């Protein structure tokens, strides 16, 4: 195959890759990684006990304490009261039913309870039940489990923002077939990583990747390999989403799609570098960089928060997102510089 045919084949392959980048950008693949909401927070909530423990009944908090998830696979209906003790939710074998006249139905629509109550909202009124799910599981926003003051830190945190704090302990009462079940938990706050420490690391990472593009193709190929590894770890550490959204396996499989694509592009880049094709390595670095940015941007708050959503150590999750963002941007810039530089060298007549 002549050089012209090789270049045309390469151009077609790059067109396909860029098309995939566009599709992934529109689909927002990182949404599958974190679900809805933020990927990082200085607050964190967890369930400490369900008393009494009931086989078939599981409760957990999601999104750092913003939501409660209940799965009730028993043969008995679970009742959850609203904030005034009124009937709010029924979760059981015939699905989930919600009282439309409970003030909690409206209050829980907004994180800071700013939604105006409708005229028929009345904790004392006869319940009007509406089915909201056919499955015995439900996720809802609950104001008893998170900090409610927007823009203000808890007093103890404001007084000492360098230490960890227990903001408050909480209880959400429930009943299973009329028998009381208490779900107890805690909301904590942890200091974020110091900006003076992490931001120079992010900038150094960006500078090193850009510098790789100004050196030999093999240096840029090494940066591609690191980016592919971070992309794969980011996908594999996908946390278990709400049961009403997806299975954990399905979420990981969805997150693996962009990671596998980054890996394929990185492999092509390493191969091109080994053959001394610097301009092609640079173009592939640009493609991989865009893919990394598409993955990492929805998780950007991980870079400056104490807690992150993930199934592995928080430090590794933060490092992976740093590579996706700083490394991805470095590959775009460094790859473009490399493609321009090596194209000029490769086109010089022997």
Image: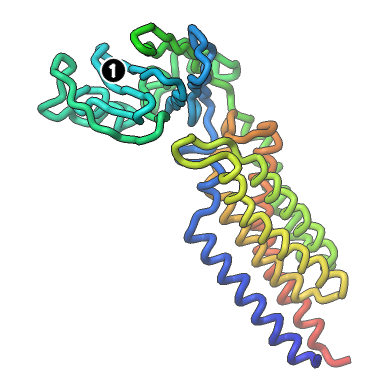
Q: Residue at x 47, y 61 (%)?
A: 26
The residue drawn where x is 81% and y is 76% is 277
Q: 133 above or below 16?
A: above
Q: Mark 1 points at which residue?
A: 82
Quarter holding residue 18: bottom right
Q: Image check: 146 left or right of 313? A: left
Q: Can residue 350 be seen in this view?
A: yes
Seen from the viewer's position, the closer of residues 84 and 138 is 138
User: What residue sits 46% from the left and 25% below the top?
Assistant: 73
Name the residue rendered at 45%, 27% in the picture: 69
Q: Position of residue 43 (x, y in %)?
A: 51, 24
Q: Is residue 110 left or right of residue 193?
A: left
Mark 1 residue element: loop
The picture places residue 157, in percent across and down from the top left corner, at: 50, 16
Q: How many labels does the image show?
A: 1
Please state the horizontal and vertical placement of residue 8, each as a whole percent of the image: 69, 87
- Note whether 269 is above or below 58 in the view shown: below
Residue 8, above or below 254: below
Which colour style is shown? rainbow
Residue toward you, 148 or 91: 91
Instruction: Examine the rendered structure and indicate whether residue 321 appears above or below residue 172.
Output: below
Q: Check the picture and name the quadrant holding the N terminus.
A: bottom right
Q: In which quarter of the image is the C terminus?
A: bottom right
In the rendered image, the residue lying farthest to the front is 75
């Amino acid at each position: 195959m002549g050089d012209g045919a090789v270049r045309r084949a390469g151009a077609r392959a790059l067109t396909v890759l860029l098309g995939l980048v566009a599709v992934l950008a529109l689909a927002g693949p990182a949404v599958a990684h974190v679900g809805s909401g933020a990927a990082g927070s200085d607050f964190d909530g967890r369930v400490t006990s369900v008393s009494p423990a009931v086989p078939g009944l599981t409760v957990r908090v999601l999104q750092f304490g913003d939501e409660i998830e209940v799965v009730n696979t028993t043969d008995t209906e679970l009742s959850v009261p609203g904030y005034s003790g009124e009937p709010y939710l029924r979760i059981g074998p015939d699905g989930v039913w919600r009282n439309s006249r409970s003030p909690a139905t409206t209050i829980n629509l907004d994180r800071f309870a700013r939604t105006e109550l409708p005229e028929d909202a009345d904790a004392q009124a006869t319940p009007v039940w509406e089915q909201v799910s056919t499955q015995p599981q439900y996720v809802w926003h609950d104001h008893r489990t998170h900090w409610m003051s927007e823009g203000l830190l808890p007093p103890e945190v404001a007084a000492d923002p360098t230490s960890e704090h227990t903001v408050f302990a909480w209880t959400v009462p429930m009943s299973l077939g009329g028998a009381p079940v208490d779900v107890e938990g805690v909301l904590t706050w942890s200091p974020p990583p110091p900006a003076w420490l992490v931001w120079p690391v992010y900038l150094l990472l960006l500078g090193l990747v850009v510098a790789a593009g100004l050196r030999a193709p093999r240096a840029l190929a090494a940066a591609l390999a690191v980016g592919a590894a971070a992309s794969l770890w980011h996908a594999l550490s996908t946390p278990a989403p709400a049961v009403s959204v997806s299975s954990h396996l399905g979420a990981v499989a969805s997150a693996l799609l962009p990671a596998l694509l980054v890996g394929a592009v990185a492999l092509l880049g390493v191969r091109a570098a080994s053959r001394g094709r610097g301009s092609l390595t640079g173009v592939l670095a640009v493609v991989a960089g865009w893919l990394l940015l598409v993955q990492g941007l929805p998780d950007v708050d991980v870079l400056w928060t104490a807690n992150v959503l993930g199934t592995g150590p928080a430090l590794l999750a933060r490092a992976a997102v740093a590579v996706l963002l700083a490394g991805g941007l470095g590959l775009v810039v460094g790859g473009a510089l490399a493609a321009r530089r090596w194209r000029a060298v490769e086109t010089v007549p022997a």
